[in-house]
Amino acid sequence: MGLPAQVVARYQCSEPVFGVVAPGLLRDALLHMAKENERALRELCDEAGCFKETWIVEFVFLLSEKWNLPESARYQAIEIFERFMLICTQEVSFSAEAEEEENSWVLVKQRIEDTCVLRLVSCIQLASKLSFHYSIVSNTMVLKFLQSLDFSYTTDQLLESELAILKALHFQINVPTPSAYIELLLEVLGHNGCLLPMKQMHDMCQHLLVLTYLLRVSIYSTLLKVSIENTSPNELQLVKFAAVKEDLMLLAVGVIGASAFLLHPEGWNQVAENLIDTTGISMQSIVEIVNAILKHSIDDVVDDC
């Protein structure tokens, strides 16, 4: 027996389908993701976000586009790479402290930098396997790409790299991404009677999320200065702000709010009130992150639309 036509069509489509999730399931999913976000913020280390630099984001986005990967895989790859590199950094730090030799840190740091491109590509490859019904990045594709950059890795080395990442992360690579939070919140908005066209909203959210990742430094720098009402934050304020930069629920709310303002400014208040009721994030916080996103990305959005 073959699969029903609706099921086949659903898995062949790379676009999310809104308005089909039962209210009970929607509520459970939202609660689960909110708890996951809170847990991640509680366990945040001081170096969080260090491996989401612009060149890393650009590398992942461009290579994912070259290999026709879905949007979710791109953000998954960045999150996998960030978590893996933070673990490597912590291990290197402990090792250097144990040996009490500055040269030890320099050597291990150099080793990490030497394999950075390989690790990045491996994270993209792992992310592609999580969305296997779209497109899987094969070893042949990876080797061909690395050879174009004058790297001479073998298939065994590719497999070893993937395994090293999987082991370091205890095989927990299906990590939350901002795109998942955005899609869930859009589903909730639709369920709560928001009349904005969700397909159009989703397209704009995707565009703004890309820009937010690429303009991450500028956007969060603006948000920090506004939130503390000071253009020169001190070290303690910078440390505390790390949780804001890694808050996926806040990022999703900001992207949705900015998208609603660009597409349907007359319906912005309705969207904002729904987001407040759903997430518990204050109106002030929503306004601040929406303004920061729009300030740095609106020219790009207008040019491309």
Image (cartoon, rainbow, N blue to C red):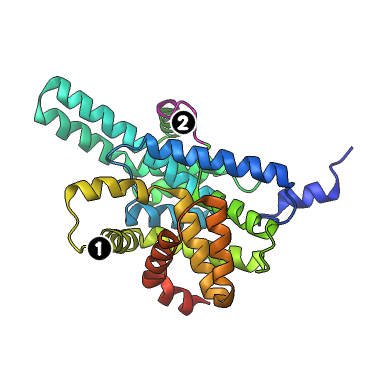
Q: Is mark 1 on a helix, strand or loop?
A: loop
Q: In terms of image quadrants, where is residue 30?
A: top right
Q: Is the magenta stretch mostly helix, strand or loop?
A: loop
1 or 2: mark nearer the eye: 1
255 shown above or below 262? above
* 172 inside magenta stretch: yes
Q: In terms of image quadrants, where is residue 224?
A: bottom left
Of 238 and 79, which appears nearest the observer?
A: 238
- Residue at 20%, 46% in the rendered image: 236
Q: What element carries label 2?
A: helix
Residue 146 at what x, y percent from top left? 40, 46
Residue 6 at what x, y percent from top left? 82, 50
Residue flagged by tag 2: what amino acid is it? Leu
Q: Distance between the residues labelled 1 and 2?
A: 49 Å
Q: What stretch is highlighted in magenta?
A: 166-173
- Residue at 36%, 70% in the rendered image: 296
Q: Is residue 143 visible?
A: no
Could you tell me if the residues under marks 1 and 2 are in contact, i.e. CB atoms within 8 Å? Answer: no
Q: Earlier in the sequence, mark 1 or mark 2?
A: 2
- Residue at 23%, 50% in the rendered image: 237
Which residue is the site of mark 1? Answer: 229
